Image (cartoon, grey):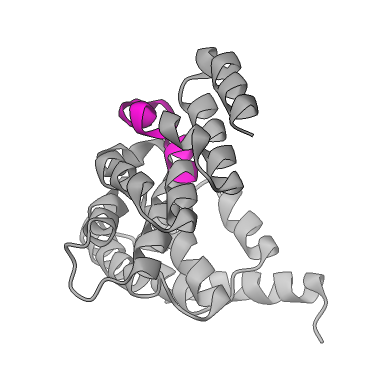
Amino acid sequence: MQSQGEKHHAHTAIYRSIGISLITLFLMAPCTAGARETLESSRKIERWWGKTPQEEKTNKHKALDLALKNLSSDDYQQQENAFYSLEMLGEQAVPGLIAIISGRQDGVTPKMQMDAIYAAGRIGAVSAPAVASITSALRDENPDKRAIAAVALGKIGRNAEGSVPYLIPLLNDKTPWVRESAATALDRIHMRKSTIVLAHYSHAR
């Protein structure tokens, strides 16, 4: 069995190989913590997309298609790589995620919707266009979906302020982790209301 250090060096070698695209890098190769640190510390991470604007555009489009395809993969590493690729794509990934969350894409399953909500939260503030779709999930009958939606809105932060009226009722949700997720989300979205939010949450418990 390879040590963590050996795995790190193996992945670093893969990243530096000529012709390795970001698509292969994140969606087909395992993503270890060391590999992620190597890429995050790069001052010119954009070079993985291509040397020319057209090459970059083409590779980003391919990376997005593959990431959305693998978003609900049963293979943990493949799914995690898809999440990380979507994070790197940022704002460009949001329309595709909205199509999944809202159910506009053919063949969408509840699991795919939850994974897309989670991915939008990981992307953060630039997922603001997805807030309306994610907010709708707060009323879903599945408590896990309600909780994931609340967490995602909290990670989007102040750009998700429109969801506050829909998060507040969840402070009295019958499911403990939904209440906790809603309280945390409200606190992150509007920090100066944190005392009120926590008071509501404590009462709900």
Left or right: 97 as drawn, with respect to 150: left
Query: In which image quadrant can residue 47 be found?
Result: bottom left
Percent position of residue 135, x then y: 32, 42
In the image, residue 88 above or below residue 128: below
Instruction: Give the residue at the far top of this rendering.
Output: 192
In the rendered structure, does residue 156 fall within the stretch colored magenta?
A: yes
In the image, residue 49 above or below residue 74: above
Q: Residue at x 40, y 72 (%)?
A: 23
Percent position of residue 168, x then y: 43, 29
Q: Residue at x 52, y 12 (%)?
A: 192
Percent position of residue 146, x then y: 43, 49
Residue segment shown in magenta: 151-167
Q: Residue at x 48, y 38 (%)?
A: 155
Q: Nearer the viewer, residue 117 or 64?
A: 117
Q: Nearer the viewer, residue 176 or 11?
A: 176
Q: Is residue 16 visible?
A: no
Instruction: Give the residue at the far bottom of this rendering.
Output: 1
Query: In which image quadrant can residue 152 be found?
Result: top left
Q: Is residue 116 visible?
A: yes
